[in-house]
Image (cartoon, rainbow, N blue to C red):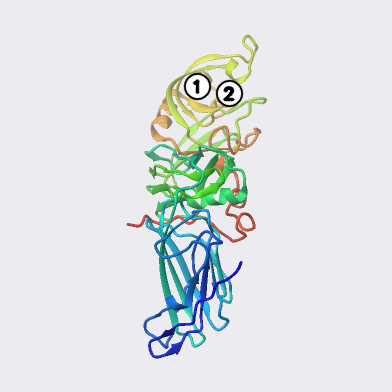
Amino acid sequence: MRHTESPRGVRAGSRVVGCTLLVAALGAGVTGCSSDGSPLASEPYDATDQISFSGSVEEGKQVDPDEPLEIVAEDSDGRITDVTVADASGRRVAGELAADGSRWHSTSPLAAEAQYTVRVSTEDEDGAPGRKVLTFSTGKPTTTKRLAVTFGPKAGTYGVGQPLTAELSDPVKDLAQRAVVERALKVESTPAVSGSWHWVDDKKLHFRPQDYWPAHATISMRSTLEGLKVNDRLRGGRTKPLTIRTGDRVIAVTDAATHQLTVYKNDEEIKQIPVTTGKPGFETRNGVKVVLAKERFVRMRSTTVGIAEGSSESYDLDVHFATRVTWSGEYVHAAPWSVGSQGYANVSHGCVGMSTDNAEWFFDTVREGDVVTVENSAGDTMETFGNGYGDWNLDWAKWQAGSALTPGKATGQAEQARLRPQST
């Protein structure tokens, strides 16, 4: 790039300023590193005469949103100490500043049809601070297709095991493009906890904390993707925010070896129920599951799970107080026909069966999003995705590896989502 020079300026008191900056249209944003300021001056001097602009970036002008930004300190005696760029809604554009303060470049794109304010702080060879503020706007994008995001679940109160979801209207496969999307999906929790997004596939993300959500938490999701370039054919669209809450911490633990289901509420045991789980050949899945729905009446037929009608294992039953934990048909439900085996033997086709009274109590106690685990079964581990919410069966390191912001992936920097209380 060819740099244009601006004359050195002289501020009040005839001090020669040793820092000239160039703002070029090469990167997409601005962040910064802060300076403690200079002890030689209580207020920064006006560095306007020491900053030159190239490309289409000018005060009050409109620029192409696809043009990136770069700032260069052309004088070896001066350095950049801080750069920020934010639009009118407060969205900041990320960037990197060289260790010696000689150059700053953006690492995230500008939004289309937005107004930005750039604040550049400098320091001369004597440590005196300078400052330049610039405003510009971006024009309409060349791409017109918008990437829509739909948050889930629907608004309401859920158990502490409920993952958050984000459904995209179009697939995003490229890792750097995924990072743009993921960085814009904001999650805030009160109380605050640490969490991470995980890409389930090209169009779906799940979010969970390292441990279950706190009881009685308020969790909000919003997107700052609107107007941001994802790729040459996609820009972010407007997304409806979502707020959910959690209830008590309710966790049901089924031990297939002892044939007992124990329910804990806020870490205190409140009930132990004799149960039966899957018999050999139909073993109940091990691991953590999440309540998907509650159905007071379900007709269960063996043909829906691949058991031929008329075989020795076929069934057609009217089932009451059925709490669903997989989409493939695993429930915790009333099984009055197996009361004699409950607490003693596993005789079901994969569900957790109990007496009608106990099933009604369980049905009334749990809510969608509560945690149901199975241990000591000979069955496989619950699928992570696709058959309900098996998200908690991935350890934290593997969960984080599904993020596009994991160290060494899209940006090469450690970026972990941090949930914080909602700001006013």
Q: Secondary structure at mark 1?
A: loop
Position of 392 relative to 13 (above/below)? above
The residue pinned by badge 1 equals 335
Residue 266 at x, y percent in the picture: 42, 46
Q: Residue at x 60, y 33 (%)?
A: 285
Residue 196 seen in render:
no
Residue contact between numbered discs 1 and 2, judged by CB atoms under 8 Å? yes
Residue 87 at x, y percent in the picture: 41, 58
The residue pinned by badge 2 equals 348
Q: Nearer the viewer, residue 137 or 366?
A: 137
- At label 1, which amino acid type do we have? Ala
Q: Nearer the viewer, residue 245 or 168?
A: 168
Q: Residue at x 49, y 83 (%)?
A: 124
Left or right of residue 259: residue 113: left
Looking at the figure, which quarter contains the N terminus?
Answer: bottom right
Q: Around disc 1, counting alpha carbons within 10 Å, would you say few (fewer than 14), some (14 to 19), or many (20 or more)?
A: many
Left or right of residue 116: residue 18: right
